[in-house]
Image: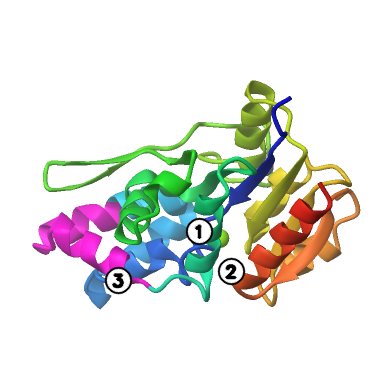
C-alpha cells in the first residue's frame, strides 16, 4: 500500500523570503510617484496598486530584468533553504504547495534562483506574465464569499478546492506569518498543524482565534520547521 503523505502549505512573503516582495518592488518607484500611488493602495488594494507600480516603473525606464534581479536578490528567511532542501529529499513523504497573494512570476524567480523549482508541486498565486516590457498581473479569482480576505484571493477557498481535488493526506501543515494565513487554517483539523512565525501578526491572530482546531506551533527559522516535520515522520 502506498504510504500516505503530508501536505505542506507554504506562504511566500515573510515566510520563504524575508520581506514583502511587493513593498520592495514599489520602493523602486521614485519617492514622489510612490506618494501619489499611496491613495490607490488605500482605496483599491494591492492588485490595482501593483499594476500601477509596474506601469510607473516601465515609464521610468526600469526594465523587467531589473525588477527580476531585485526580487531574486532578496534574502530568504533564515534557514529556509535548509527546509526546501529537506523537502526535496523527501518527495514521497511531503507534497509541497505555495499559497500566496504575491504573483507567479516573483515566486518562480525566487525558486529558480535557489534551484528549488522542482521542490514545489504547485504554486497558487495571482497569475503574472511578462509582456510589453512589464509584468502583467491578474487576480487569482474574484471572490465575494469571504469578507475577511481580499476579493482577489481567499486562501481558504483555494486550499479547500485543492483538498477536494486531491488525495487524502495524513495531515496538513500550513506555514505562514500573516493574518491572511489564518483563513485557510480554519479548514484544518486537530491532527493538522499551523506553523505561525513568532512575533508576526499570524501568531496573535492564531492564539486569539476561538474556532481554530489545528495545533499552533511557533517558528523562527526554516530549521525549526524541519524539526517539526521530522517529528511528524517519526510518529507515522
Ligand atoms: Mg506572508
Ligand atoms: Zn478568506
Q: CA distance from mark 2 to mark 3?
A: 19 Å
Asked if labels 3 and 2 touch by Cβ distance under 8 angstroms, the answer is no
Residue at the image position 66 percent from the left and 42 percent from the top: 7
Q: Nearer the viewer, residue 67 or 116?
A: 116
Q: Is residue 52 above or below residue 19?
A: above
Please state if 18 lies on the left or on the right of 148 as rendered: left
Alpha carbons under labels 2 and 1: distance apart: 8 Å
Callout 3 crowding tier (Cα within 10 Å): few <14, some 14–19, many ≥20: few
Seen in the picture, residue 167 relative to 154 is either above or below; the reply is above
- The magenta stretch spans which residues? 52-74
Residue 36 in view of the camera: no
- Comes first in the chain, label 3 or label 1: 3
Q: Position of residue 42 (x, y in %)?
A: 48, 59
Residue at disc 2, CB closer than 8 Å to ligand 1: no
Q: Quadrant of ligand 1?
A: bottom right
Q: CA distance from mark 3 to mark 1?
A: 17 Å
First in sequence: mark 2 vs mark 3? 3
Depth check, front residue: 205 or 42: 205
Residue at 70% from the left image edge and 44% from the top image edge: 184
Instruction: Answer yes or no: is residue 55 visible.
Output: yes
Q: Which of the labelled discs sits on residue 166, or is there none?
A: none
Whole-percent x and y of residue 3? Answer: 71, 34
Decide: few, some or many residues near mark 2? Use Cα within 10 Å; few <14, some 14-19, many ≥20: many
- Element assignment for label 2: helix
Whether residue 154 is situated above or below residue 195 in the rendered picture: above
Look at mark 1 in the image and give the residue it sits on: 84
Q: Residue at x 63, y 64 (%)?
A: 177
What residue is pinned by disc 2? Answer: 222
Q: Position of residue 170 (x, y in %)?
A: 77, 38
- Identify the element where label 1 is drawn: helix
Label 3, on which residue? 73
Q: Is residue 142 above or below residue 153?
A: above
Amino acid at each position: 500500500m502506498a504510504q500516505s503523505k503530508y501536505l505542506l502549505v507554504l506562504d511566500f512573503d515573510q515566510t520563504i523570503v524575508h520581506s514583502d516582495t511587493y513593498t520592495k518592488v514599489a520602493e523602486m518607484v521614485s519617492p514622489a510617484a510612490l506618494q501619489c500611488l499611496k491613495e490607490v493602495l488605500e482605496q483599491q488594494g494591492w492588485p490595482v496598486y501593483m499594476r500601477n507600480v509596474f506601469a510607473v516603473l516601465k515609464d521610468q525606464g526600469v526594465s523587467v530584468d531589473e525588477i527580476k534581479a531585485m526580487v531574486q536578490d532578496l534574502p530568504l528567511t533564515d534557514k529556509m533553504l535548509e527546509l526546501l532542501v529537506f523537502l526535496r529529499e523527501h518527495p514521497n513523504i511531503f507534497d509541497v504547495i505555495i499559497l500566496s497573494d504575491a504573483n507567479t512570476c516573483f515566486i518562480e524567480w525566487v525558486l529558480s534562483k535557489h534551484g528549488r523549482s522542482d521542490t514545489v508541486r504547485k504554486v497558487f498565486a495571482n497569475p503574472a506574465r511578462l509582456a510589453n516590457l512589464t509584468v502583467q498581473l491578474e487576480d487569482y479569482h474574484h471572490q465575494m464569499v469571504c469578507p475577511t480576505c481580499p476579493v482577489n484571493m481567499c486562501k481558504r477557498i483555494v486550499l479547500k478546492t485543492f483538498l477536494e481535488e486531491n488525495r487524502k493526506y495524513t495531515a496538513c501543515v500550513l506555514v505562514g506569518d500573516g493574518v491572511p494565513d489564518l483563513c485557510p487554517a480554519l479548514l484544518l483539523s486537530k491532527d493538522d498543524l499551523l506553523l505561525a512565525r513568532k512575533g508576526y501578526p499570524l501568531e496573535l491572530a492564531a492564539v486569539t482565534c476561538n474556532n481554530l482546531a489545528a495545533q499552533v506551533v511557533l517558528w523562527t527559522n526554516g530549521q525549526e520547521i524541519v524539526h517539526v516535520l521530522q517529528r511528524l515522520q517519526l510518529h507515522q
